[in-house]
Image: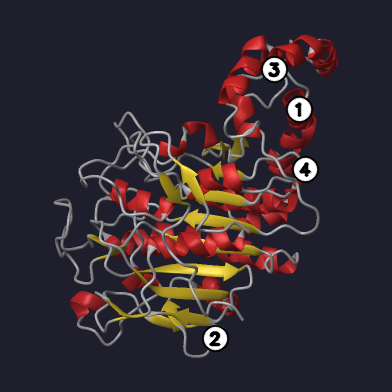
Amino acid sequence: MLSILSPDAATNRRELMRIGGLSLLGLSAGQLESLLAANPAGGRAKSCVFLFLFGGPSQIDLWDMKPSAPAEIRGEFKPASTSVPGIQICEHLPRLAEQMDKICLIRSMTHGMNVHGPACSEIFTGRDYFGAPTTDQARDLDWPSMSSLLMRYGRSHNGLPASVVLPWYLQFPGQAKRIAGQTGGRMGERHNALLIEGDSAEKGFRVDGFGLQETVPIGRLNSRRELLQNLSHPVRQALSGPTNVEQFNRHRERAYTLLKGRAGELLDLDRETVQTRQRYGETMVGQSLLLARRLIEAGVSLITVNWEDETKTDGVNTCWDTHQNNFPKLKNLLCPIFDQAFPAFIADLHDRGLLDTTMVVAVGEFGRTPHMGQFSQSSNTRKSGRDHWPSVFTSLVAGGGVAGGQVYGESDHHGAQVKDRPVTPGDLSATVIHHLGIDPKATYVDEVQKQTFNLSIGDPVPDLRS
C-alpha cells in the first residue's frame, strides 16, 4: 500500500503510532496500515480483478482443446462452439461460451516452474522464483505481489485501500505459513493488501477491526475522535512539523469513515437482490466475485480473488489440482462453479458499464500435462489425472480495453509447448500494472538486500486491444 508518510519517514511513522493516536481510535498499527492509501483521483477509475485459479486448471480440457489429438491426450470432453465463430471451448462451460465475445484467450502462457508454491509466486509477482523449488511456503525473500505493489504505488478512492485480497490467503493444510508470493515480501509486509476474509459456511465476509464493538458505540467513537484532536499539539511537537500530522489526520478520517459504516456497507451482500446473488452462485467464488464488483464500484483498483472450493483442504487434489479423477472433478465440481460465477461477473460488469475500465484476468499457476497420467512432478498423479505443466497454459482476459472474441498465442498440436507469441508471468503482470496507470519500469528498493528493482520485468502484452 501507499505509505502514510514519505518513504524515508519510517521513524516518524513509528513515533506517531507510539504516541497512541491509533489506540484511541480503537485501531492497531497493522489495521491502519492496511486501511490507508493516498492520492485519490476523480472520474471513473481503472480497476482490475485478478481471479487466481489455485491448483492449475487443465488448459487442454477447458479452453485449449485438441480434438484431433490421440485419446490419451485429448481426453473425454468434447469442444463446443461459442458466441464467436471459430473459437471453441469445453462442452461443460456453456455460460462462458455465451460470453466469449467479451473474452480473450491467451493460449501461450509459459514459465518453467512446476511446483505449486514457487509457481504461484511467479504468477502473483511476475518474476522467476528466487530459490530452489523445494517449498510452498512464504519467505522473507519473496518478491512482492502485484497486490502489494498496488497498495504502495496505486491510487485509492473514497478513503478505500488501493488493493484488496479475498476471500483468503492461499495456504496448504498442515503448513505453518501461507504460500509464497502473496504479500509485500522483500518490499515489506506493511505494503500487504487488505485481506477481506470469507466464511465458506455463511458466504459472508469480514475484516478484523472494522466492526464497532458493543462497548464502543458510535457516540463513544466520536468522543475518542475529539480526544485525539486535542492531542494534535503534542503530536505535532513530537514530529517537529505540521505536515505529517495533517497527513495522519486525513488518513484517520478515512479510517473513521470506514469504521462508521462504509466498510460494513460494502461487505454486506444482503444489500444485493436475491436474484443477483443467485445469478453469481451460492459459492465462495461466486460471492467473492459479487463482492469484487461492489469494490470496483467503490473505487478499489485491484481485487485479487483466490479460488476456494470444498477441496481447498485436500492436500492431494487441492482446488484445480487434478492428479486423480481429472474429468469427474472438472465436470461435477469445478466447471459448474466457474461457469456460473465467472460469466455472471463478466455480464454484470458489461451491463453496468464497468467492463470498459475493468480488466478481468483468470489464470492458474500452470496447466496440466498433455498426456493423461504423465508424471512431471507429483507422485500422486494417477492414470485418471494430469500432473503439473508450466510449459504452456491459458489465461482468460476481458475488459479494460482488451478486445474480446479473440485468441492470442498458440500451443502446438498436443498442447505441450508454445507455438506462437509466448506470454510470461512478467508480461501478464506488466499488462495489469500498465492498465492501472503505473509504469511497470518504475523502481523500488527492497528491504532485504537494499537493491533497486523494477516493478515488473515483463512488457505489456501487445495487440490485445481493440
Q: Which residue is mark 1?
A: 243
Quadrant placement of the C terminus = bottom right
Viewer-proximal residue, 285 or 143? 143
Q: CA distance from mark 4 to mark 3?
A: 27 Å
Of pointers 4 and 1, the one earlier in the residue sequence? 4
Local packing at callout 2 (Cα closer than 10 Å; few below 14, some 14-19, many 20+) is: some
Q: Residue at x 37, y 34 (%)?
A: 448
Of pointers 3 and 2, the one earlier in the residue sequence? 2
Residue 243 appears left or right of 361:
right
Q: Which residue is mark 2?
A: 84
Q: Which residue is mark 4?
A: 158
Query: As drawn, which residue projects farthest toward the bottom?
Result: 85
Q: Amino acid at mark 4?
A: Asn
Looking at the picture, how far across and down is residue 324, in whole percent? 23, 56
Viewer-proximal residue, 33 or 291? 33
**Is residue 7 positioned above or below 346 on the image?**
above
**Marks 1 and 2 in Cβ contact (< 8 Å):** no
Of pointers 4 and 2, the one earlier in the residue sequence? 2
Of pointers 1 and 2, the one earlier in the residue sequence? 2
